[in-house]
Image (cartoon, rainbow, N blue to C red):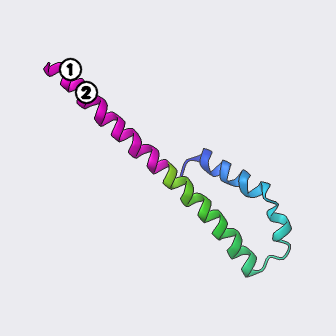
Amino acid sequence: MDLFILRSLWRKLKGNNCSKNMGRNNERNIKKHNDKLHKEQDKAKKAAMARKEKLKQITKQFNANKQNEINK
């Protein structure tokens, strides 16, 4: 995953006062923290995939328009 995305995820989690909820390093708190982290990572992956898909569509449309202009 991109380093920029990981840094932003870390800042988000750090800003949510995780230390307050992670007073005891028990299994339940660790699982809660990991679930939150994985949810944010999945969200970032989906956003990146959506951007790539949108770019593909724009490129296809641009190439089709360019081809139509050449054929005219």
Q: In this view of the protein, which residue sits in the foreground, 61 or 51?
A: 61
Across and down, in percent, residue 33 comes to 70, 69
Which disc is residue 65 wearing? 2
Q: Amino acid at mark 1?
A: Glu
Residue at image position (17%, 19%) is: 70
Q: Secondary structure at mark 1?
A: helix
Residue at image position (73%, 80%) is: 28
Q: Which residues are magenta?
A: 48-72
The answer to whether residue 65 is left or right of residue 5 is left
Pick the quarter of the image with the C terminus: top left
Q: Which secondary structure is most common in the magenta stretch?
A: helix
Residue at image position (72%, 53%) is: 12
Q: Which residue is mark 1?
A: 69
Bin the neighbour count of mark 1 within 10 Å (Cα to Cα): few under 14, some 14-19, many 20 and up.
Answer: few
Q: In this view of the protein, which residue sits in the foreground, 24 or 32?
A: 32
Q: Are marks 2 and 1 in contact (CB under 8 Å)?
A: yes
